[in-house]
Amino acid sequence: MNSTIELTLTYSPLPNIQSPMFKMNSTITIEDYLNSLPEDIDQIDVSFQELTYLPDLSRFYNLQRLFCSHNQLTSLPPLNPNLIILKCNNNRLTSLPPLNENLESLYCYGNLLTVLPGLNDKLDILDCCNNRLTSLPFLPPNLSIFQYMENPIHDDIMYLNQGHHHYHNHNIIQIARLLYKFKYFFYSLKLKNKFRDWLWVKVREPKIQEYYSPANLVKLLSAIDENNEEQFEITLNNW
């Protein structure tokens, strides 16, 4: 079995399993359409409808597939816990809600995403091409298809994978994980340095300034018996 795949932008259409196709018009709103669906529906498809928002879907307790691609959405409602496939590509999303634990396929290419939420361990397919991602979360161990082209992070990964004519998926994922660990290490050091600077400015520096102020020297010397020249000399030298 071939252990490598070539990452492309070719997609197989996903079938409509249950819900009738929504066609928005002047008399039917997205709320009207959703209210017409049974609560146990397992798929909702509202793609290609020029939607600017998507209402709450929490009442659909059995929802497993949500297709809302090719709209004008800038955000999504919280994801249903049983959701397996989410296709929200070609919108104007700047962020995604937290991913549910059962999600296996995420197609979010063609948006304005700068970051991705944490990825669950069950995720098998991730397509985040053509966004504005400069970093990636830690990639799940079972991820088999990972597409990330047309993002700033793509150049970083390709630089570390240069010289290969084909994109080896295993290598790409390992490199992406390495970049994640490097980012984590970098920001850990940065936080440490920031804390050290804060500790110096807020705690240590004021104490040092107070100790070595002339007023404190007078206070220290005033506490010494005037006949104890040795202690007077020690205090003066230490100061």
Image (cartoon, grey):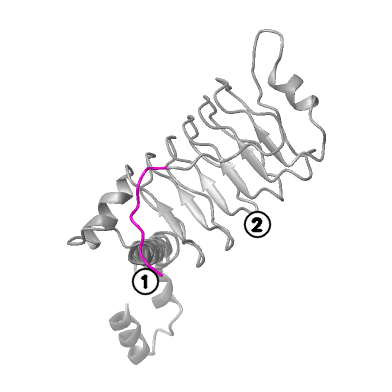
Give the secondary structure at mark 1.
helix
**Residue plotted at (43% across, 83% down):** 224
| Image location (x, y in percent) of residue 63 | 72, 43
Against 46, residue 218 (above or below) is: below
Q: Nearer the viewer, mark 2 or mark 1?
A: 2
**Residue plotted at (44% across, 59% down):** 202
Q: Which mark is residue 101?
A: 2
User: Observer-nearest residue: 211 or 180?
Assistant: 180
> Quadrant location of the N terminus?
bottom left
The type of residue carrying mark 2 is Glu
* Residue identifier under label 1: 217
The Cα atoms of the two marked residues, 2 and 1, are separated by 64 Å
Instruction: Count neighbours of disc 1 (C-alpha within 10 A) and say few if under 14, some if 14 to 19, many if 20 or more.
Output: some
**Residue plotted at (41% across, 63% down):** 184
Instruction: Count neighbours of disc 2 (C-alpha within 10 A) and say few if under 14, some if 14 to 19, many if 20 or more.
Output: some
State the extent of the magenta-drawn residues as a range: 1-10
Q: Which mark is residue 15?
A: none
Determine if the magenta segment contains residue 8.
yes
- The mark nearer the N terminus, 2 or 1, is 2
Determine if the magenta segment contains residue 75.
no
Give the secondary structure at mark 2.
loop
Residue 163 located left or right of residue 30: left
The type of residue carrying mark 1 is Leu
| Image location (x, y in percent) of residue 179 | 35, 62
Residue 113 located left or right of residue 124: left
